[in-house]
Image: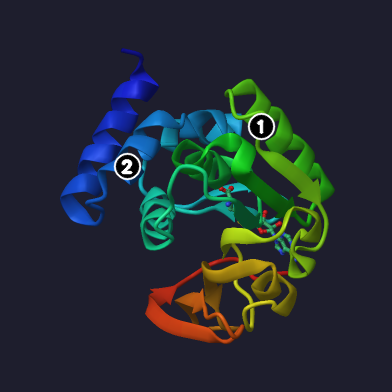
Amino acid sequence: MTDPERARERLVDRLRGERVDDEAVLSAMAAVPRHRFVPESRRKNAYADRPLPIGEGQTISAPHMVAIMADLLDLRGGDRVLEIGTGCGYHAAVTAELVGAENVYSVEYHEELAERARETLAATGYDDVSVRAGDGKQGWAEHAPYDRAYLTCAAPELPEAVVEQVRPGGLLLAPVGSGSQRLVRARRRADGSLDRETHGRVRFVPLQ
Ligand code: SAH
Protein backbone atom coordinates (compact mmCIF):
# COMPACT_ATOMS: atom_id res chain seq x y z
CA MET A 1 0.00 0.00 0.00
CA THR A 2 1.36 3.45 -0.89
CA ASP A 3 1.62 6.30 1.62
CA PRO A 4 -1.37 8.21 0.18
CA GLU A 5 -3.49 5.05 0.34
CA ARG A 6 -2.57 4.50 3.96
CA ALA A 7 -3.31 8.14 4.81
CA ARG A 8 -6.66 7.90 3.02
CA GLU A 9 -7.57 4.77 4.93
CA ARG A 10 -6.83 6.52 8.22
CA LEU A 11 -8.99 9.47 7.17
CA VAL A 12 -11.90 7.19 6.30
CA ASP A 13 -11.55 5.41 9.67
CA ARG A 14 -11.76 8.76 11.43
CA LEU A 15 -14.83 9.78 9.41
CA ARG A 16 -16.47 6.46 10.26
CA GLY A 17 -15.84 6.99 13.94
CA GLU A 18 -16.99 10.58 14.04
CA ARG A 19 -19.50 11.83 11.58
CA VAL A 20 -20.49 9.43 8.83
CA ASP A 21 -22.03 5.98 9.06
CA ASP A 22 -23.20 5.33 5.51
CA GLU A 23 -20.90 2.57 4.21
CA ALA A 24 -21.50 3.44 0.54
CA VAL A 25 -20.34 7.01 1.21
CA LEU A 26 -17.32 5.78 3.18
CA SER A 27 -16.37 3.42 0.33
CA ALA A 28 -16.60 6.32 -2.12
CA MET A 29 -14.33 8.40 0.14
CA ALA A 30 -11.91 5.45 0.32
CA ALA A 31 -11.86 5.13 -3.46
CA VAL A 32 -11.13 8.69 -4.61
CA PRO A 33 -7.44 9.74 -4.52
CA ARG A 34 -7.89 13.26 -3.05
CA HIS A 35 -4.13 13.91 -3.31
CA ARG A 36 -4.40 13.79 -7.12
CA PHE A 37 -6.96 16.63 -7.08
CA VAL A 38 -5.14 19.14 -4.86
CA PRO A 39 -2.21 21.27 -6.06
CA GLU A 40 1.20 19.57 -5.84
CA SER A 41 2.30 21.89 -3.02
CA ARG A 42 -0.69 20.81 -0.86
CA ARG A 43 -0.37 17.07 -1.33
CA LYS A 44 1.14 16.40 2.06
CA ASN A 45 -2.09 17.70 3.60
CA ALA A 46 -4.45 15.98 1.18
CA TYR A 47 -5.77 13.60 3.85
CA ALA A 48 -6.11 16.05 6.69
CA ASP A 49 -9.81 16.67 7.32
CA ARG A 50 -9.82 20.31 6.27
CA PRO A 51 -10.40 22.57 3.28
CA LEU A 52 -7.42 23.36 0.99
CA PRO A 53 -6.78 26.15 -1.53
CA ILE A 54 -7.09 25.05 -5.18
CA GLY A 55 -6.32 28.32 -7.00
CA GLU A 56 -8.44 31.25 -8.23
CA GLY A 57 -9.17 32.07 -4.58
CA GLN A 58 -11.26 28.89 -4.28
CA THR A 59 -11.04 25.96 -1.86
CA ILE A 60 -11.80 22.26 -1.92
CA SER A 61 -14.19 21.38 0.93
CA ALA A 62 -13.01 19.36 3.92
CA PRO A 63 -13.53 15.61 3.41
CA HIS A 64 -16.13 15.34 6.20
CA MET A 65 -18.24 18.01 4.45
CA VAL A 66 -18.13 16.12 1.15
CA ALA A 67 -19.12 12.92 2.99
CA ILE A 68 -21.94 14.62 4.91
CA MET A 69 -23.30 16.15 1.70
CA ALA A 70 -23.19 12.80 -0.12
CA ASP A 71 -25.01 11.23 2.81
CA LEU A 72 -27.72 13.94 2.95
CA LEU A 73 -28.32 13.65 -0.80
CA ASP A 74 -29.03 9.94 -0.44
CA LEU A 75 -27.28 9.16 -3.74
CA ARG A 76 -28.09 5.87 -5.48
CA GLY A 77 -26.54 4.19 -8.52
CA GLY A 78 -28.07 5.64 -11.67
CA ASP A 79 -29.21 8.94 -10.12
CA ARG A 80 -28.61 11.86 -12.48
CA VAL A 81 -26.83 14.58 -10.53
CA LEU A 82 -26.14 18.27 -11.15
CA GLU A 83 -23.21 19.84 -9.27
CA ILE A 84 -22.66 23.61 -9.19
CA GLY A 85 -19.01 24.43 -8.43
CA THR A 86 -16.67 21.78 -9.88
CA GLY A 87 -13.56 23.34 -8.33
CA CYS A 88 -10.82 20.72 -8.65
CA GLY A 89 -13.33 17.94 -9.38
CA TYR A 90 -12.84 15.99 -6.14
CA HIS A 91 -16.43 16.21 -4.90
CA ALA A 92 -17.68 15.29 -8.40
CA ALA A 93 -15.48 12.17 -8.29
CA VAL A 94 -16.97 11.11 -4.93
CA THR A 95 -20.45 11.61 -6.39
CA ALA A 96 -19.40 9.63 -9.47
CA GLU A 97 -18.40 6.69 -7.23
CA LEU A 98 -21.97 6.63 -5.88
CA VAL A 99 -24.09 7.22 -9.00
CA GLY A 100 -21.78 6.39 -11.94
CA ALA A 101 -19.54 8.97 -13.64
CA GLU A 102 -21.76 9.20 -16.72
CA ASN A 103 -24.59 10.53 -14.52
CA VAL A 104 -22.65 13.49 -13.09
CA TYR A 105 -22.98 16.95 -14.68
CA SER A 106 -20.95 19.75 -13.13
CA VAL A 107 -20.79 23.48 -13.86
CA GLU A 108 -17.75 25.60 -12.92
CA TYR A 109 -17.59 29.38 -13.18
CA HIS A 110 -13.82 29.66 -13.74
CA GLU A 111 -12.79 28.37 -17.14
CA GLU A 112 -9.31 27.46 -15.92
CA LEU A 113 -10.58 25.42 -12.97
CA ALA A 114 -13.06 23.65 -15.27
CA GLU A 115 -10.25 22.72 -17.67
CA ARG A 116 -7.97 21.49 -14.90
CA ALA A 117 -10.82 19.50 -13.29
CA ARG A 118 -11.55 17.83 -16.61
CA GLU A 119 -7.90 16.81 -16.92
CA THR A 120 -7.69 15.48 -13.36
CA LEU A 121 -10.99 13.59 -13.68
CA ALA A 122 -9.73 11.98 -16.90
CA ALA A 123 -6.37 11.09 -15.31
CA THR A 124 -8.04 9.43 -12.31
CA GLY A 125 -10.56 7.39 -14.30
CA TYR A 126 -13.60 9.66 -13.99
CA ASP A 127 -13.55 10.92 -17.58
CA ASP A 128 -17.28 10.27 -18.01
CA VAL A 129 -18.09 13.11 -15.59
CA SER A 130 -19.31 16.07 -17.71
CA VAL A 131 -17.87 19.49 -16.84
CA ARG A 132 -19.02 22.78 -18.34
CA ALA A 133 -17.58 26.25 -17.76
CA GLY A 134 -20.36 28.73 -17.09
CA ASP A 135 -22.65 30.29 -14.54
CA GLY A 136 -24.13 27.59 -12.35
CA LYS A 137 -27.06 29.82 -11.40
CA GLN A 138 -28.47 28.78 -14.78
CA GLY A 139 -27.95 25.08 -14.00
CA TRP A 140 -27.42 22.84 -17.05
CA ALA A 141 -30.81 22.61 -18.77
CA GLU A 142 -29.69 20.30 -21.56
CA HIS A 143 -29.40 17.28 -19.24
CA ALA A 144 -32.37 18.02 -16.95
CA PRO A 145 -34.36 16.71 -15.19
CA TYR A 146 -31.96 15.74 -12.38
CA ASP A 147 -32.69 13.42 -9.47
CA ARG A 148 -30.32 15.42 -7.27
CA ALA A 149 -28.64 18.84 -7.42
CA TYR A 150 -26.12 20.42 -5.05
CA LEU A 151 -24.03 23.56 -4.77
CA THR A 152 -20.49 23.64 -3.41
CA CYS A 153 -20.59 27.44 -3.11
CA ALA A 154 -22.97 29.49 -0.98
CA ALA A 155 -25.96 31.16 -2.62
CA PRO A 156 -28.22 33.83 -1.07
CA GLU A 157 -31.11 31.53 -2.04
CA LEU A 158 -31.47 28.25 -3.96
CA PRO A 159 -31.06 29.36 -7.61
CA GLU A 160 -34.42 29.20 -9.36
CA ALA A 161 -33.13 27.62 -12.58
CA VAL A 162 -31.45 24.83 -10.59
CA VAL A 163 -34.65 24.17 -8.62
CA GLU A 164 -36.61 23.95 -11.87
CA GLN A 165 -34.19 21.41 -13.33
CA VAL A 166 -34.77 18.93 -10.49
CA ARG A 167 -37.57 16.42 -11.00
CA PRO A 168 -40.58 16.32 -8.67
CA GLY A 169 -39.54 14.20 -5.67
CA GLY A 170 -35.86 15.04 -6.29
CA LEU A 171 -33.50 16.57 -3.73
CA LEU A 172 -31.48 19.80 -3.62
CA LEU A 173 -28.67 20.57 -1.20
CA ALA A 174 -26.83 23.87 -0.82
CA PRO A 175 -25.14 26.23 1.59
CA VAL A 176 -27.60 29.13 1.75
CA GLY A 177 -26.98 32.60 3.14
CA SER A 178 -24.75 35.59 2.62
CA GLY A 179 -22.43 35.95 5.59
CA SER A 180 -23.76 33.31 7.91
CA GLN A 181 -24.69 30.18 5.95
CA ARG A 182 -26.71 27.06 6.66
CA LEU A 183 -26.79 23.80 4.80
CA VAL A 184 -30.30 23.53 3.33
CA ARG A 185 -31.81 20.35 1.96
CA ALA A 186 -35.02 20.65 -0.02
CA ARG A 187 -37.29 18.09 -1.64
CA ARG A 188 -39.19 19.29 -4.68
CA ARG A 189 -42.89 18.49 -4.33
CA ALA A 190 -45.10 17.46 -7.26
CA ASP A 191 -46.57 20.98 -7.42
CA GLY A 192 -43.05 22.45 -7.75
CA SER A 193 -42.91 23.90 -4.22
CA LEU A 194 -40.08 22.95 -1.82
CA ASP A 195 -40.07 21.07 1.44
CA ARG A 196 -37.01 22.55 3.22
CA GLU A 197 -34.87 21.37 6.13
CA THR A 198 -31.88 23.10 7.65
CA HIS A 199 -28.77 21.13 8.63
CA GLY A 200 -26.47 23.34 10.68
CA ARG A 201 -24.05 26.17 10.05
CA VAL A 202 -21.43 25.86 7.31
CA ARG A 203 -18.77 27.97 5.60
CA PHE A 204 -18.38 27.85 1.82
CA VAL A 205 -16.96 30.27 -0.74
CA PRO A 206 -19.73 32.47 -2.16
CA LEU A 207 -21.40 31.88 -5.53
CA GLN A 208 -20.07 34.40 -8.08
N1 SAH B 1 -16.60 20.80 -5.17
C1 SAH B 1 -15.34 21.48 -5.27
C2 SAH B 1 -15.26 22.63 -4.31
C3 SAH B 1 -15.19 23.86 -5.04
S1 SAH B 1 -15.31 25.37 -4.13
C4 SAH B 1 -14.16 20.56 -5.16
O1 SAH B 1 -14.31 19.39 -4.81
O2 SAH B 1 -13.04 21.02 -5.41
C5 SAH B 1 -16.65 26.14 -4.97
C6 SAH B 1 -16.51 26.29 -6.46
O3 SAH B 1 -17.68 26.98 -6.92
C7 SAH B 1 -15.32 27.13 -6.90
O4 SAH B 1 -14.54 26.38 -7.78
C8 SAH B 1 -15.97 28.33 -7.61
O5 SAH B 1 -15.22 28.80 -8.71
C9 SAH B 1 -17.31 27.76 -8.03
N2 SAH B 1 -18.35 28.76 -8.30
C10 SAH B 1 -18.58 29.92 -7.68
N3 SAH B 1 -19.62 30.56 -8.24
C11 SAH B 1 -20.07 29.79 -9.26
C12 SAH B 1 -21.11 29.92 -10.22
N4 SAH B 1 -21.91 30.96 -10.27
N5 SAH B 1 -21.27 28.92 -11.10
C13 SAH B 1 -20.45 27.83 -11.09
N6 SAH B 1 -19.44 27.65 -10.21
C14 SAH B 1 -19.25 28.63 -9.30
Look at 52% across and 81% down and name the residue there. 189
- Considering every residue shown, the one lying at the far top of the view is 1
Query: Which residue is denoted by mark 2 in the rendering?
Result: 24
Look at 83% across and 57% down and name the residue there. 134
Q: Amino acid at mark 2?
A: Ala
Depth order, front residue of 146/15: 146
**Position in image of residue 12 (x %, y %):** 28, 39
Residue 38 in sight from this viewpoint: no
Q: Is residue 172 left or right of residue 208?
A: left
**Position in image of residue 130 (x %, y %):** 71, 41
Depth order, front residue of 15/26: 26
Query: Which residue is denoted by mark 1 in the rendering?
Result: 128
User: Would you call the spot at circle 2 few (<14 residues within 10 Å), some (14-19), or many (20 or more)?
Assistant: some
Element under label 1?
loop
Q: Is residue 136 left or right of residue 129?
A: right
Q: Is residue 6 left or right of residue 155?
A: left
Depth order, front residue of 128/89: 128
Element under label 2?
helix
- Establish if 158 lies above or below 138: below
**Position in image of residue 207 (x %, y %):** 69, 70
**Position in image of residue 44 (x %, y %):** 44, 31
* Quadrant of the rendering where the C terminus is positioned: bottom right
Q: Amino acid at mark 1?
A: Asp
Q: Which of the colour schemes (rainbow, by chain, secondary structure, one colour) is used?
A: rainbow
The numbered mark at residue 53 is: none
Give the tally of numbered discs: 2
Look at 45% across and 32% down and name the residue there. 32
Q: Is residue 175 left or right of residue 107?
A: left
